[in-house]
Image (cartoon, helix red, strand yellow):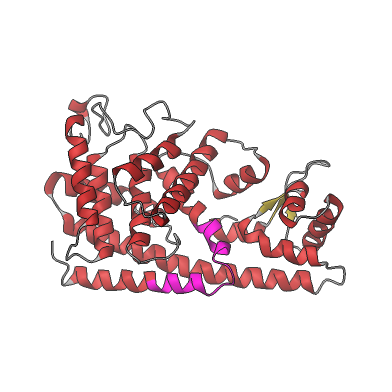
Amino acid sequence: MVVEGALAGLHGEALAALGRLAVAGRMVPSTGWFLYGFVRKEAVISSQIEGTQATLRDVAVFEATERAEHPEDVEEVCNYVRALQHARARLREGEPIGTRLLCEAHELLMRGVRGGESEPGTVRTEQNWIGGSTPATARFVPPPPEEVPGALAALEAWIGADDPLPALVRAGAAHAQFETIHPFLDGNGRIGRLLITLLLERWGLLGEPLLYLSYAFRQRQPEYYARLSGVRAHGDWERWVAFYLECVRRAADDGVGLAAALFELHSADRRRVLVDPASTVSAARLVDLLPQHPVVTVPMVAELLGVTAPTARKAIEIAEGAGVLRETSGRERDRVYSYHAYLRALTGEG
């Protein structure tokens, strides 16, 4: 495949959008402000593509309280975050992107959740298929198990070798090939999308996982599957790459707009707390932590700030009085507070 003509134009647009996203991530005092929400947004949407119902708000509440309406779905999303964090740490240690790293990520992804009985972290030794009740009626039948190790080894070698294709295009091609190999009994879609994130970082296109690409994939989900099927059935790499590059541009542009909106929102909220005559140092410190902890409790704030429970409670009361935090549990005891405007901006929910 040659990246020329219309594909070259799409590649240039997607690359420029990624550059803008990288700049947006560097324009705030702490990249962690965006990483919390952007990583979890990707985790939530990637999991929703596979059928989970958990929302980002559900995940934030669970992380603060260990309570959830749909705990199994929330745990799947949290596992995705753990898998990504582990894989990024291993990259920093010098681990190559290959079968071993993907198996480690898969073991964390599937630990204790739906499909967790299907040999987490282990390349399959059985035939799998997509759609239909048997391979004969399936929409797609991946390679037989005896061919999977060799196919993964070839993919790993290609990832580690020099190639004339641009890195951004290679990441999309690697995803399509991984999905075609389908090396695990379950969880292939999420690991395949995580692979793109890791490759963008390894190849220097993004220093942090700020691209929530699953957002664009899910908006065009039927086409996402159709383009992957086109590669498998007809070797139609050009249409897959064009679709993928369009999704990268769209997700990156959305991320840039969201980053600006979140920064503006948080700056305004910080000012509202600071101008309150009753404001305290602890209240100001709490507001600075909220983008990474958008749902809090009094014990949680006390631990984060290293203060007593009464001091933490006072800080929350000041943030609540300024309209920054909102009590969401409706309880008198063990109350839960949400940075509601921030979560609303992240999720697009009302």
Quadrant of image for the C terminus: bottom right
Using residue 6 as the reference point, say whether residue 308 is left or right of it.
right
Depth order, front residue of 270/228: 270
Depth order, front residue of 266/32: 32
Using residue 231 as the reference point, say whether residue 117 is left or right of it.
right
x and y, in percent, of residue 286 in the image: 73, 61
| Quarter location, residue 151 | top left
x and y, in percent, of residue 20 in the image: 42, 74
Depth order, front residue of 207/263: 207
Q: Main secondary structure of the magenta part?
A: helix
Q: Is residue 188 magenta?
A: no
x and y, in percent, of residue 263 in the image: 59, 70
x and y, in percent, of residue 230 in the image: 18, 48
Which residues, given as a range, are shown in magenta?
19-38
Quadrant of image for the N terminus: bottom left
- Residue placed at 55% from the left, 56% from the top? 36
Using residue 189 as the reference point, say whether residue 6 is left or right of it.
left
Q: Is residue 319 positioned above or below 155 on the image?
A: below
- Residue placed at 41% from the left, 25% from the top? 117
- Residue placed at 37% from the left, 27% from the top? 118
Total marks shown come to 0
Can residue 348 be seen in this snapshot? no
Residue pushed farthest front?
A: 93
Can residue 260 be seen in this snapshot? yes
Using residue 237 as the reference point, say whether residue 37 is left or right of it.
right
- Residue placed at 68% from the left, 65% from the top? 288
